[in-house]
Structures are given as C-alpha cells and as structure tokens.
Image (cartoon, helix red, strand yellow):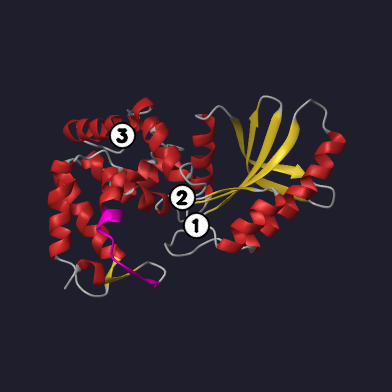
C-alpha cells in the first residue's frame, strides 16, 4: 500500500492522511541531521498500518531519536512536555512568565486587580517600557482539547472590566494596552476570529504562524524542565514545586539534584543534556 493512502488517527479522533514530510519537519526541528532522520523515517514507514494513531508514530520516532542523542529526543517531546506541566495550570503560568521575562518583559504572577465591577485574579501581568499587558493562561493536561470561542469572550470581558478601572485610577504612566490568552493547545477557528476582531492577542502551540509557543521556545532555548528524558516524573514534580520551571533554572540551582539524592554520574548526564538544550 502507498503510504499516501494510510489514514492516521489524531488525538482528537480526527482521521487524516499520513504525511512523511510532516514527520520529517518535526524531526528536523530538533536539530538532528539527515544521517539520523532518514533511518528513523525508514523504520517508521515500514511499521505503518491503516488506522495507526499519531501517538504510536510519535512514541516510535521518539524512542529511535532517544537512542541517538537524548537532547534531540527532549526537543522532540516539547509538545508533550508542556502537557506535563500539569496537573494544575500553576506551573504553566510560571513558564509563560519566564518566557516573557527572557523576551524583555517584567512580569508578576497571580496578582489581584480591581475592575470597574468586580476584582479579578490575573495569571500574568507583563510590563515593558510604559505599557502593561494582562495575560490569561489556559492550560490543558490532555491532548486534543482546544480553546473554543468561549475562552476569549470571557477573557475579553475581564480585560475590559479591569481596563476601565486601570485607566481611571492609574497613578503612574503605565498604560494598559492589551489582553492576551495563552494556551498550550490550539484555538478553534471561531476563537481566532473573535480574538482578531476584538483585539485580544492569542498565543498557542502553533499560533501566530512562526511565532507560536514552539517557535519562541526553540528560538530562545527556553525549554520546560519536563522535556528532560533523564529526570523521572517524581523528580520533575519536585523541581516544579520548587519553581524550577525552565531547564536553565536547574543549571543555576543544581543543588536540587543533590537534594533529590541523584548520583554524581547521573547528575553529570542530566546537566549535560540540559546545557545542550539551552545553547
């Protein structure tokens, strides 16, 4: 059977045709070259069958990539790693805050602001020059769950309520100029249309094109600690509870590995993997 005729099942349950070019592109993003990628593509292609899930294809490609270099596998699992920032949305808020800090913003997390009608807890407030931005983070711990139009509708009403009070009572020169919605998944077509119409900035896994979360993370080397292929789930949760959200945070606070009882040999491997990710 021609591989172009093979249907694969996405996390959402949607059926699409298999694309070797898409798989190649996702492997390319890790920085791996053709000498590593081509044998992986050959093996995955040989194991395809009608109705295979994207999860099975991902797991096979990930395992083959990990055999070569663990930091390539870490980059490849970025999307999954964002889901692993759960189960609550709190680590994701801190992750978004950290990405913005490295992009020239000063941020505050979990601050209460008074609106005209009611008070609101804002996930992240970002300041740059004389402008401030309110950011709401919508975290999903399951793949296939997208943000529908209700999310930006709700966030826009909160933003407008805060803005009325902000403009009336601002004691400094900071202007509240924009509201953002950031998600680790995707927005539906209606959500994107509404966000564009009302002036909300929407940031998702792959939106805006070429400047979505995955692009920003790759460009800045700001990988969440959950991408590590060498840390256990328990160790990652421990680090997240200590506000170690980015891989580069662990380089600065490596004593946490001693606290976890990690051996010197394993510690060296973990720090080597992480330093290669951050450069």
Question: In the rendered structure, are the residues bearing label 2 and label 1 in contact, judged by CB atoms less than 8 Å apart?
Answer: yes
* Mark 2 crowdedness (10 Å alpha carbons): few <14, some 14-19, many ≥20: some
Residue named by callout 1: 186
Quadrant containing the C terminus in the rendered view: top left
Where residue 242 sits, quadrant-wise, is top left
Dot 2: element: loop
Eyeballing the image, is 225 above or below 194?
A: above
Which residues are drawn in magenta? 13-23
Residue at 20% from the left image edge and 34% from the top image edge: 269
Q: Earlier in the sequence, mark 2 or mark 1?
A: 1
**Picture coordinates of residue 176, whole percent (x, y):** 74, 36
Residue 261 belongs to magenta span: no
**Picture coordinates of residue 230, whole percent (x, y):** 24, 43
Q: Earlier in the sequence, mark 3 or mark 1?
A: 1
Residue at 45% from the left image edge and 59% from the top image edge: 141
Dot 3: element: helix
Left/right of residue 100 with respect to residue 155 in the rendered view: left
Left/right of residue 230 with respect to residue 38 in the rendered view: right
Residue named by callout 2: 206
């Amino acid at each position: 059977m021609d591989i172009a005729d093979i249907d694969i099942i996405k996390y959402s349950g949607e059926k699409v045709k298999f694309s070797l070019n898409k798989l190649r592109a996702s492997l390319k993003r890790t920085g791996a070259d053709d000498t590593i990628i081509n044998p992986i593509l050959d093996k995955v292609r040989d194991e395809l069958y009608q109705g295979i899930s994207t999860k099975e294809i991902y797991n096979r490609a990930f395992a083959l990539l990990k055999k070569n270099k663990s930091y390539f596998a870490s980059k490849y699992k970025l999307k999954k790693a964002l889901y692993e920032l759960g189960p609550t949305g709190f680590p994701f808020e801190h992750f978004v805050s950290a990405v913005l800090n490295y992009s020239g913003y000063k941020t505050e997390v979990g601050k209460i602001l008074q609106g005209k009608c009611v008070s609101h807890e804002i996930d992240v407030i970002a300041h740059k020059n004389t402008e401030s931005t309110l950011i709401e983070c919508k975290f999903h711990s399951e793949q296939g769950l997208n943000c529908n139009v209700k999310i930006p509708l709700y966030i826009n009403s909160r933003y407008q309520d805060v803005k009325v009070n902000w403009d009336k009572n601002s004691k400094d020169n900071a202007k509240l100029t924009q509201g953002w919605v950031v998600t680790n998944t995707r927005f539906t077509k209606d959500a994107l249309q509404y966000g564009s119409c009302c002036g909300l900035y929407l940031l998702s896994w792959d939106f805006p094109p070429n400047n979505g979360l995955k692009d920003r993370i790759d460009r800045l080397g700001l990988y969440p600690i959950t991408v590590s292929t060498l840390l256990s789930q328990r160790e990652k949760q421990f680090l997240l509870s200590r506000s170690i959200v980015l891989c580069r945070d662990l380089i600065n606070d490596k004593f946490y590995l001693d606290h976890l009882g990690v051996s010197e040999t394993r510690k060296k491997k973990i720090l080597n993997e992480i330093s290669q990710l951050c450069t």
